[in-house]
């Protein structure tokens, strides 16, 4: 059925989909259509479509998606001066006057989003993301992170106001009703990313992406799908990897998300420094492990915190979010 889509910053996105149909967005970054990453993407598309999903794919290289965040992302004049008169909501730093020498990308794109003045490519991706119930980031691990073109997608599409604000972040985030996950290939072997491996603990590697990007925007983050060193595996092993991915996709949305520290544990004020409440810190003293990979509080890291969902009663210091 045809219907008017959500209004994003003043511009309405056209959508065609069933009211009951779920939507999956695959944000894909690989240069070669013959790559293992492409095969992984195709398995996800096929399996999710079989389950009745509408599957959207943002093939960033094929789209020639621009990675650099510049003033070109804004249509029309800059408008940051308006915010200092408090004529519109403002989430950035408090300043006395506009500095004409300083282009503040985050603040300017927030205002442009509110006024429907972001560039067409950003608006198109935000429309896909708004529609999606599930987002899968498919990529080869580059320098312990995402490829530059995918980092550009994150920087340009997840704009302030649309994807996050200080009032709406982490478990209270804007995308708290959506699920997201990383699916990626490595050049290194699994043992190289063990706590005693040369690359260090994969849980630490994934913390900035899974907590600092996905969960920061509110996503319920599913455990990552990691394909260890497929380029150095026999064909039969690569086939088994794809079969395992297909099997996981069949029950993906029944999985528990990864565990993160809820906002309720922290004093969410500048006066309090956004620090954990003293009472909460005291309660952590009796726990054998830190709360999360990032909130370890000087304790041993919780085992596999960023690659395996923990049972609800695994650690009593991980309370359910309260509204």
Image: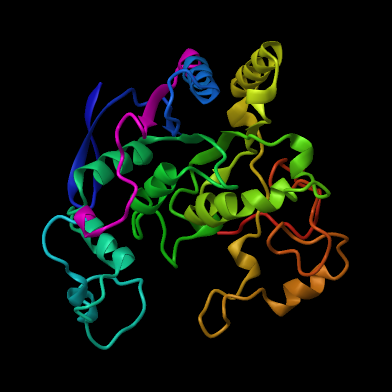
Quadrant of the image for the N terminus? top left
Q: Is residue 57 magenta?
A: yes
Tell whether 29 sits left or right of 75. Answer: right
Tell whether 60 sits left or right of 118. Answer: right
Instruction: Quadrant for residue 153, please give it.
Output: top left
Q: Residue at x 85, y 71 (%)?
A: 285
Residue 16, image x and y in percent? 26, 25
Determine if residue 276 is in view: yes
Q: Is residue 47 magenta?
A: no
Q: Residue at x 37, y 27 (%)?
A: 56
Determine if residue 20 is in view: no
Tell whether 207 sits left or right of 303. Answer: left
Q: Which residues are magenta?
A: 48-73
Instruction: Quadrant for residue 254, please give it.
Output: top right
Q: Residue at x 52, y 25 (%)?
A: 37
Residue 68, image x and y in percent? 32, 52
Residue 199, image x and y in percent? 72, 48
**In the figure, 85 relative to 226: above or below?**
below
Quadrant of the image for the C terminus? bottom right
Q: Residue at x 64, y 42 (%)?
A: 257
Tell whether 177 sits left or right of 250. Answer: left
**In the figure, 150 relative to 94: above or below?**
above
* In front of the other: 194 or 131: 194
* In front of the other: 308 or 119: 119
Residue ranking furthest to the left: 76
Q: How is the image coloured?
A: rainbow
Instruction: Quadrant for residue 307, please give it.
Output: top right
Q: How many marks?
A: 0
**In the figure, 91 relative to 223: above or below?**
below
Residue 234, image x and y in percent? 70, 15
């Amino acid at each position: 059925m045809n219907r008017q889509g959500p209004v994003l910053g003043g511009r309405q996105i056209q959508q065609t989909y069933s009211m009951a149909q779920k939507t999956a967005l695959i944000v894909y970054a690989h240069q070669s259509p013959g790559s293992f990453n492409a095969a992984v993407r195709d398995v996800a598309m096929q399996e999710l479509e079989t389950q009745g999903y509408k599957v959207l794919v943002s093939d960033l290289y094929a789209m020639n998606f621009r990675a650099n965040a510049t003033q070109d992302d804004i249509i029309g004049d800059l408008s940051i001066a308006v915010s200092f008169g408090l004529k519109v909501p403002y989430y950035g730093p408090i300043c006395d006057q506009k500095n004409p020498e300083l282009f503040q990308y985050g603040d300017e794109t927030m205002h442009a989003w509110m006024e429907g003045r972001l560039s067409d490519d950003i608006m198109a991706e935000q429309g896909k993301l708004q529609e999606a119930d599930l987002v899968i980031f498919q990529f080869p691990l580059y320098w312990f992170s995402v490829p530059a073109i995918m980092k550009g997608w994150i920087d340009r599409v997840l704009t302030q106001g649309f994807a996050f604000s200080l009032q709406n972040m982490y478990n209270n985030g804007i995308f708290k009703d959506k699920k997201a996950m990383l699916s990626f290939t490595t050049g290194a072997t699994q043992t190289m990313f063990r706590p005693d491996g040369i690359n260090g603990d994969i849980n630490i590697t994934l913390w900035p992406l899974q907590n600092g990007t996905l969960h920061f925007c509110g996503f319920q983050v599913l455990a990552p799908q990691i394909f260890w060193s497929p380029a150095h595996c026999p064909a039969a092993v690569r086939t088994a990897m794809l079969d395992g991915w297909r099997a996981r996709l069949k029950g993906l949305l029944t999985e528990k998300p990864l565990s993160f520290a809820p906002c309720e544990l922290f004093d969410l004020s500048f006066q309090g420094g956004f620090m954990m409440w003293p009472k909460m810190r005291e309660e952590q003293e009796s726990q054998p492990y830190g709360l999360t990979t990032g909130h370890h509080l000087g304790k041993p890291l919780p085992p596999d915190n960023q690659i395996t969902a923990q049972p609800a009663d695994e650690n009593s210091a991980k309370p359910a979010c309260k509204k």
